Each structure stands twice: as structure tokens, then as C-alpha cells.
Amino acid sequence: MASPSRNRLLLCLLLALLALALASLFIGYVPYSAPDILQGLIAPTETVPAIIVRDIRLPRTLLAMVVGASLGLSGAALQGLLRNPLAEPGLLGVSASASLGAVIALYFGLTTLSNWLLPASAMIGAGLATTALYLLARRNATTLTLILAGLALSSLAAACTSLALNLSPNPYDVHDMVLWMLGSVKDRSSADLQLALPFVACGWACLLASGSALDTLSLGEDSASSLGVDLARLRALIITGTALSVGAAVAVSGAIGFVGLVVPHMLRPLTGYRPSELLLPSALGGALLLLLADIALRLISTQQELMLGVVTALIGAPFFLWLVVTSRRQWA
């Protein structure tokens, strides 16, 4: 049963997210009034304000929330599975591997056969990376080992991605791939949201279903097994959930890092340090953080809008360094 403090936290996050989502509909190159926004949301008219709100601003807002929630939830689940507070899809090479899968689909033109092949390729890349990390973590790998393994996976995925870009015969395709890899929810449509949402929803269901087992796993694998936790099923749930949610998110937004690292760390003290209590708040917190970052980009950008993945990396990298320094002091 959820604690009252967690329920209050969820309510605060949800209200803040709804308020921010509403505010994001008002932010753009052309300002619109509240009646224009309302007309675009509920009235089937074809006026310019209605089209812009319905077809441009609303999909961008919803996609930022979906991608942020996927990254936050996956980060919290991976930290619980690996029992490592530094685990995160971007840091451990999962996002880079998903990006590689998507780039391969774009390079070979698989998207001309079916739009579903792009998220499928990204999810395969994310699933392979997550599986490799888990196989390493189950051998009692240290934090340093996991970080180095994630760096190796990221470097390999980046090298293969660079090779695909280098061999691409069309410079316009290279330009599109590079912009996509930087990560953004700009110029996305409802079709992109519809493409990702089924896979993301299945991934969320897998990750949220692992909560109680993650609490028991925090006692150690032997203790969890003796208490009736099916470790094989738990691993499959989290690996599948991470691959589905992160892979589908990367397929439509590109690589966006550090959300899954920052959000669980910010919310963990407010949830009693229980993995199951952290999952849903991390999803809401991730959606809130990414939507806030996207709104900030629209407010501060002038001639050239910054890419969302670049900004999250600029925020997350110093935060990660601070965590490493803090961890070293605790180990000393």
C-alpha cells in the first residue's frame, strides 16, 4: 500500500505536469489566446490557430511527456534491477544502442517498407544492450565496471553509427540523421505519437509490474529467491520493458540522455528509498523534466532552436560528475 507521503508526491507531480502541459500550448512563435487554444483542442475547425495547436503544439507536448516518462521510469527500474544508483539508459549505452538500431533502419531504407520497422529496430538495439548489461551485473560487477561497460557499449554504438553516416551516399540523409541523433520533439506529428505509444505503453506495463519484486531484490538475489521472487521473470520484465519504452522513445525523438539518472535521484529521498515507490513518481518526474526543458528551449531560443538532447546532456553531465564525486567520498 502506498504511503500518504507518496500519494501527496504523486498528486503534486501530476498537478504540476498538467499545468505545464497547458502552459506549453500557449508557447510558440505566434502567441494565441485561451479561446484559440480551446478551439484548437475541442472544436473540429480548420482555422490557422486550431491547426497549429492541434497538429503542432499538442503532439509536441504529449511526445515530450511520453518520452520523459519512459526515460524516468526505465532509469528507476534499471537502478533497482542492477542495484546501482548510477544505472541509466543513456549512461549505460541503452539509448545509444537504440539509436544505432534506428540509424540502421534509416540507412537501409527499411522505413520505406513499413513505418513499424523504425521503432522495432530501435527496440532490438535497446534490448541487446540491456541484456548485455544485466549479464555483466549478475556477476557482482562493481559500479566502475558497469560504467566502463556502458561506455564501451556507447562507444561501439557511436562508432557503428558514425560508420553508417560515413558510408551514406546521400548528404541530405546524413544531415537528417545527425539532427535526429541530437534528440528533439520539435516538428513531430500525431503520427509519431501513435507510432510510439503502443510500444511505450507495453513497456510501462512491464516496468510497473516489477515494483514489488524490486523491493525484495534490494535484499540480494539469494534472499529474493528464498522469498519466492522469480528472478528470471523479473529480469525479462525489466529488460523487455526498457527495450520497448526506451527503443520506441528513441525512435521518434532521437537520443535524449540523463533524464533517467537525474529524476530518480531527485525523487528517491521522497519515496522512502523503496524501488517500488519510486517507479511511478519517476515516470511523472521524467515527463515533467523533459517538458520543462522543451518549454525552456522555446523561450530562450532565437534564430536557431537548441536540440533537446544537447540541453539534457549539458544538465545531466555535471550532475553525474557530482554523483561520482559524492560516491567516492562515501566509499573513502
Image (cartoon, helix red, strand yellow):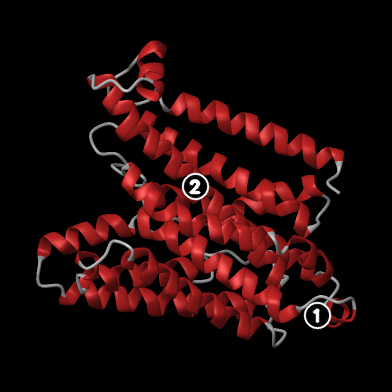
Q: Residue at x 50, y 56 (%)?
A: 200
Q: Which residue is drawn at 40% across and 24% down?
A: 41
157 in relation to 170, above or below: below
Quarter of the picture holding the C terminus: bottom right
Characterize the local packing of mark 2: few (<14), some (14-19) or many (20 or more) Cα atoms within 10 angstroms: many
| Residue on which the image places disc 1 | 221
**Direction from residue 227 to residue 283 in the image, left or right:** left
Camera-near label (2 vs 1) is 2
> Which secondary structure lies at badge 1?
helix
| Residue on which the image places disc 2 | 66
**Direction from residue 27 to residue 143 in the image, left or right:** right
- Quarter holding residue 228: bottom right
Q: Which residue is drawn at 32% across and 17% down?
A: 31
Characterize the local packing of mark 1: few (<14), some (14-19) or many (20 or more) Cα atoms within 10 angstroms: some
- Quarter holding residue 87: bottom right
Task: Specify the amino acid type for callout 1.
Answer: Glu
- Quarter holding residue 102: bottom left
Task: Specify the amino acid type for callout 2.
Answer: Val
Q: Position of residue 180 (x, y in %)?
A: 29, 56
